[in-house]
Image (spheres, helix red, strand yellow):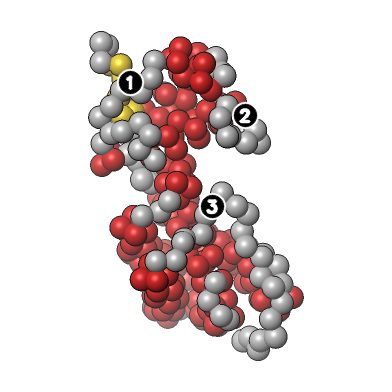
Amino acid sequence: MPNRPTIKNVHGNTLDWLGEAIVSGRYAQGSVIPPEPMLCEELKVSRTVVREAVKSLVAKGLLTTGPKVGTKVMPEANWNWFDPEVVVWKSRIGLTREFLRDLQELRRVVEPAAVRLAAERATPEDIAEIESAYQGMKAAIEQGGDYVTNDLRFHQGLLRACHNRMMVQMGKALGALLRTSFEISTTKPNGPALSLPLHRAVLDALIARNPARAEKAALVLIDGAEEDIEAVLSSRRKLPSLKAPAAQLKVRRVTTG
């Protein structure tokens, strides 16, 4: 299969390749994708594998099939943007500024409300997991290491702690945005160290069972991330790629709260 790693199974690799080909515009919206035999030859897979991948893409709103019309690419408005794979494909081929701002606005609507609920509903186990993620972030700042993965754990832990299944599912779609946002923040001098007290404020509000304070602290944290993203967009610097592993922090001598 062209330029596709083999970590996933054959179906997963084929789905990824076709999904990225559509999202990138290789197969333009409204066009008919190549017939099965051509795809089988190009990707070196069986017809069964191609059919299963097409079926998955139809379910995600990227394709439609019908007699005599073939398999057509649907308009972007029909794509399921709450599907984590669709978001990841978009991020791999390059997040546009408009798309990134759409996601950031969605985050600002969803996450503070989820945090407010989490302050009311979080179990001791939820809080312990979020605390563990926070300590991982703190250790990465002080000793070097993987800050981004722990930051992602922190925020997804908040969404799980609200115990609303729909918000938890939405959080999966937000995962690509969250990682991109966190990687942007790590490029700023002392960015992680400066944001750490803001994370602590959210966690402390959860522990105190104070929904209003938790929601306000979440907004402060998200608005700070938005400023980081806007600064990068204005500078025209290249956005981080999700194809690579999360960036590792180097040891900095900083004082953190």
Mark positioned earlier in the residue sequence (2 or 3): 2
What residue is at 50 percent from the left and 13 percent from the top?
47
Image side of residue 220 versus residue 243, left or right: left
| Residue bearing mark 2 | 9
As drawn, 103 above or below 70: below
Q: Check contact, mark 2 vs mark 1: CB within 8 A.
A: no
Image side of residue 55 versus residue 66, left or right: right
Image coords of residue 192 (percent x, y): 57, 76
Q: Between 44 and 216, which is closer to the camera in this rendering?
A: 44
Location of residue 233 (image quadrant): bottom left
Q: Secondary structure at mark 1?
A: strand
- Residue 71, which numbered label? 1
Which quarter of the rendered picture does the N terminus lie within? top right
As drawn, 130 above or below 93: below
Image side of residue 3 versus residue 107, left or right: right
| Residue bearing mark 3 | 242
As drawn, 253 above or below 215: below
